[in-house]
Amino acid sequence: MSSSTNQKAAIRLALVGLILLTLWLYAPAIHFGFWWDDPVWYSHMIGKLWWQQLLPEPDFQYFRPGSMFYVSRFLNDNGTYAAVALHWMQIGWHLLQVALSYAISRRLKLDAWTAVFVATIVALFPFSYQATAWAAPNQPMAAAFQGGAWLFFLLGYQRRQNGFYFWSILLFFLALTLQESSAALTFVPLLLFLTVQLQKAPSWQTIMQLVKRPFYSGLAWPFAYPVATAVFVLIWLQVPRQSGITELTLDPRTGLYLLQGVAFPLLGRVNGYDPAFQMLDLTVWLIIGLTVAVLLGLAIRHQRGWIALMGLAWLLMSIVPAIVGLRFSYVTLASRLLHSGGIGIALLWACALSVQNGRLPFKLIGRLILIGIAIQSVLLLRQFDQLYSVGTVHLQEAIETMSEDNGRYLFINFPDRYAPNRAPYPIGYWGMTLAPVVVDLDTFPPVLTGTNPDSISRSMPWINQAERENGPFVVDMRGAITQPNEMAQLALENDAVLLTRYQADGTFTLENVGHFDKNQPSDCLATYGEMICLQAVDIKAQADGMMAQFRWQTSAPVPPNVTIFAHLGLLNQPPLLQLDGDSWQGSLPLADWPLNTAVIDNRPFSMPEGANDLVLQIGVYDRVTGERLIGVDGEKRPLANNAYVLDVGE
């Protein structure tokens, strides 16, 4: 077998491995469902015929008929969406872009291994994670259509076949209907054309010859794309749209945030930046500038300067819409905006470091650096996956809970957005916007499960405060701050109170902490202080332990500082586990219980290992003095230690 055949086999194996690696990294995203303002976006297509989906939406900030039509293909008859299929397609579009980046690189006369490195950077580019793992963004599909347009253009030019030009222009116009920012890339064909020509004969004389005979040389075709762009932009400017997102603005920090992508290996940190560390904007600008200068210098040395310059221009064109049309407050949340510029960045780095001809040490060093960049990117993508998984699992749990019936739910401390304490890049917000307060939680179930519950969100930041402050995330919670004395009235209007608890390992747990029950059984298992009635206790096994459900009622106002104790252990022995505190995980003090209304109080716990004959001792005490309120059983007989005792077995 010849060395050429061996190399081709190695290239194919590398590409297959890259596709499988990318698929492995993004496959968990198929279970992410919807988040952010997805319910608002997806509701635009419900109840409309296919041709109506191509019309402008006055209450939507963009005109994207292609995207509207595409997404509507995933709409079920009951008004829900096939979220898993949408996520698979996002990953598929990204993989297609990876393949196209390799094909385009080869058409630009880059050697096979350099083209593999271009595809690798496109596949693993950390700034692309949000766009690919989220079902709603149009960037992966638009970038795939753009890549197809550029490949067909190169085929048309190099094979002198006008049919390829037709398909290229068509794909580009479709990309415009998917993402209007594609208009900024209208001159990419001209860059491709000039790059190929200048590689052959880099002189002004060559350019003048092209200008003199544009149709013969093929120079006329690149100008068909600005015409297509102008047609779309004229339509786009006339259609009615919701204002408030796009506006003419020039914020230097927007450019700084996006241009981090050029120096992403130098600025990215797998372990994150110390929260106390602040990198000056000037320092970031200097790192970016030096990175570009060094990469261009190396590319020129390796006789790939024109391709590297084209990659830089490609990147700059891709970020122009964000720089001139979006505020930094919006852009800083949206790393997806750099997705389409990933191939430009990849060309710049690969042309500089992947050396085809040269001394072996330089070739080895360059490729080792590129491999190191790939490893760093994989680690960052894994961290993003873990970050997003925490919130999406929690949101799915809330959606499933609400979908059990069309009830009313009060959410306490549900996360609006959250971010790692140690950001992976110095500029921007690197967390996840999960469920912003401007979008009601009850808008998620209709597009995912077909149910129609109601919900409200409130925050009580003192609950779990220590766990949040010592945990790995900075969390913003939904809803106005609500005082404990306001909880009762809010809960009376809802069927269940759902509290988010923040664990030390960074996970979020949604707990149904209780509700008010209108049914009024009169019997008491125990009475404390002649006013607090324990009506029932129910112990149920659940997946991660046990749940103790208490049913209380008070016939008179409860004094302040009076709270509940529940001790699990052996009788007449120190407790092995204490479930003490106010009802509803501390959000509803006993002093705020409404009179003559049953309070259902749920308390999860784990059974101690290796213990038998366990009992649960339940009572009420004053948290200041430690004194227990006098308790009697249903027959008015005194309770030993003023505690009702329930046998819970092993």
Image (spheres, rainbow, N blue to C red):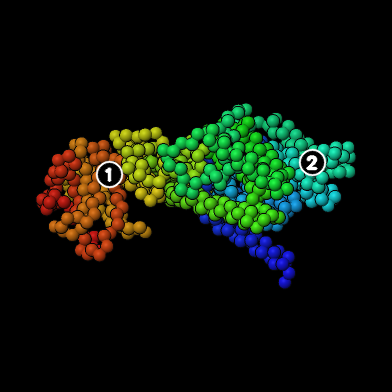
Residue 648 shows in this picture: yes
- Label 1 sits on a secondary structure element that is loop
- Can residue 395 be seen? no
For the C terminus, the image quarter is: bottom left
- Per the image, label 2 sits on a secondary structure element best described as helix
Q: Position of residue 230 (x, y in %)?
A: 75, 34
C-alpha span from label 2 to label 1: 70 Å
In this view of the protein, which residue sits in the foreground, 182 or 155? 155
- x and y percentages locating residue 514 in the rendered image: 32, 46
**With 473 as the anchor, is 289 left or right in this view?**
right
Residue with the most extreme bottom position? 1
- The quadrant of the picture occupied by the N terminus is bottom right
Residue at 62% x, 53% y is: 366
**In the drawing, what numbered circle is on residue 583?**
1
Q: Which mark is residue 222?
A: 2
Q: Sequence-wise, which precedes: disc 2 or disc 1? A: 2
Q: Crowding near pointer 2: few (<14 within 10 Å), some, many (20+)?
A: many
Residue count near mark 1 (Cα–Cα under 10 Å), binned few <14, some 14–19, many ≥20? many
> Which residue is located at x 29 percent, y 47 percent?
601
Q: Residue at x 65, y 63 (%)?
A: 13
From this view, report whether residue 161 is shown above or below residue 412: below
Closest to the observer: 179 or 311? Answer: 311
Q: Position of residue 198 (x, y in %)?
A: 79, 44
Q: Quadrant of residue 12?
A: bottom right
